[in-house]
Image: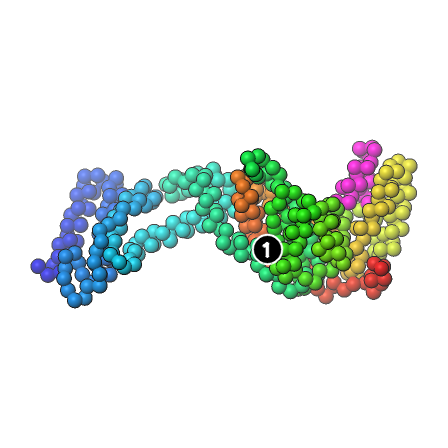
């Protein structure tokens, strides 16, 4: 009997087996039919790869069959155990299984994407079961999400090209298991405006606190990656960050966030019902058209509240100057966008929206993974958006250097 005749007989036997399954089991036979077809397809593929069938001797043969290896595939129709043909001493893997692996990888990416979008691991397992008929544990979802790590590490450690005239620094806190206990870890975030006026996420790092050593290490890592050309640092008044700035970037002017300054001011107000009034007075100081006008207005506010809240007057007189660095720019729009850390605050809100479903991260790596993924998405969105600060309007006031001196 020739090889062609043998192939025809095998196909006829295969069709007869499938027909018998359908007649005996009906739709319940789908899994067994798939297994039979896939096993037959893989055997034919191995024969073609070797150039000869089982026990066939010819000059075209490239190698020898070496039995089968069992593998369980998780499919929408259920788990199917198939026999993967092996080849002795040669690299061979059936294309049918490779296609299945591609589908599996696609599913993994979909699961990882759901995780990044803030869908809880429990909810992800429910979605996968409903759509695909597969059972996926919460542990598997977290592990599959780690497939993103390579791309996220590249983003986190990429070189920073060009100059960044303005950078914003802030932190958001997330609960993480650390050394057998639950702690609130500080996720340090840096955002910059590049020379083209576009926003970029410069860096992110999870640390145990906002202590000086952690902020200093974070700022030094930004410099090693190429951060340069910084003309202004915008941040809240935090002792650790302040000490780090003084050591790493001592010559760069600092703008204390006006919004946080107004919030801090209200804690000095003895009458709760007048706190909003005090906060409004503080904000009005920094809406003046010039540094000189702001300084005059600051004196008026201190005089107004001196008898009611003397502690506030002394504090505001000492602190207000730290929030006037934005007057270094001529343009009003540039001033408005450099007097607060609102750009990072909005970013932190987006991070919290995604992380609140997690509630508690099992470790630092999982927190870094999700937060970095959110920041990476925002960064890519910013690149395609309109200019945040017009680079042509970053011109400094003529007397700025003299004022600083």
Kindly give the residue lying farthest to the left in the view shown: 1
> Magenta residues, as a range?
259-282
Give me the residue at 53% from left, 47% from top. 369
Which residue in the protein does label 1 denote? 379
Q: Is residue 126 left or right of residue 253?
A: left
Q: Is residue 209 left or right of residue 129?
A: right
Indicate how the structure is coloured in the image: rainbow
User: Residue 206, image x and y in percent?
Assistant: 60, 46
User: Residue 14, image x and y in percent?
Assistant: 17, 50
Q: Element under label 1?
A: helix
In the rendered structure, does residue 199 fall within the stretch colored magenta? no
User: Residue 27, image x and y in percent?
Assistant: 25, 41
The quarter of the picture where residue 266 lies is top right
Give me the residue at 61% from left, 53% from top. 203
Give me the residue at 80% from left, 57% from top. 327
The quarter of the picture where residue 310 lies is top right
Q: Quadrant of the C terminus?
A: bottom right
Q: Is residue 249 left or right of residue 270?
A: left
Nearer to the camera, 187 or 12: 187
Give me the residue at 56% from left, 47% from top. 368
Is residue 203 visible in the rendered structure shown here?
yes
Is residue 335 visible in the rendered structure shown here?
no
């Amino acid at each position: 009997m020739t090889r062609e005749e043998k192939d025809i007989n095998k196909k006829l036997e295969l069709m007869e087996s499938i027909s018998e399954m359908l007649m005996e089991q009906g739709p319940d036979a789908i899994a067994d039919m798939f297994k039979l077809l896939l096993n037959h397809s893989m055997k034919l593929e191995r024969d073609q790869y070797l150039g000869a069938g089982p026990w066939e001797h010819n000059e075209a043969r490239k190698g020898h069959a070496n039995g089968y290896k069992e593998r369980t595939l998780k499919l929408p129709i259920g788990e199917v155990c198939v026999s993967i043909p092996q080849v002795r001493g040669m690299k061979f893997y059936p294309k049918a299984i490779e296609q299945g692996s591609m589908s599996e990888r696609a599913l993994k990416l979909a699961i990882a994407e759901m995780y990044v979008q803030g869908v809880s691991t429990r909810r992800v397992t429910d979605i996968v079961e409903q759509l695909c008929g597969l059972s996926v544990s919460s542990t598997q979802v977290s592990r599959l999400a780690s497939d993103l790590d390579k791309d996220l590490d590249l983003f986190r450690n990429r070189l920073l090209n060009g100059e960044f005239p303005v950078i914003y620094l802030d932190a958001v806190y997330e609960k993480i298991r650390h050394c057998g206990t639950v702690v609130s870890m500080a996720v340090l975030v840096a955002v910059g405006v590049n020379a083209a006026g576009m926003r970029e996420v410069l860096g992110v790092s999870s640390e145990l606190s906002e202590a000086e050593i952690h902020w200093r290490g974070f700022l030094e890592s930004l410099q090693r990656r190429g951060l340069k050309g910084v003309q202004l640092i915008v941040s809240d008044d935090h002792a650790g960050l302040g000490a780090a700035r003084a050591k790493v970037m001592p010559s760069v002017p600092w703008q204390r966030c006006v919004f946080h300054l107004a919030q801090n001011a209200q804690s000095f107000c003895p009458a709760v019902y007048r706190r909003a009034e005090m906060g409004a007075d503080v904000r009005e100081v920094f809406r003046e058209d010039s540094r000189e006008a702001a300084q005059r207005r600051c004196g008026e506010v201190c005089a107004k509240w001196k008898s009611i809240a003397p502690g506030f007057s002394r504090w505001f007189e000492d602190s207000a100057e730290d929030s006037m660095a934005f007057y270094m720019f001529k343009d009003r729009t540039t001033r408005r966008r450099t007097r607060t850390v609102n750009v990072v605050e909005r970013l932190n809100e987006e991070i919290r929206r995604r992380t609140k479903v997690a509630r508690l991260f099992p470790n630092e790596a999982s927190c870094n993974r999700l937060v970095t993924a959110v920041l990476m998405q925002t960064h890519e969105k910013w690149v395609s958006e309109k200019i945040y600060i017009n680079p042509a309007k970053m011109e400094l006031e003529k007397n700025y250097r003299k004022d600083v001196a």
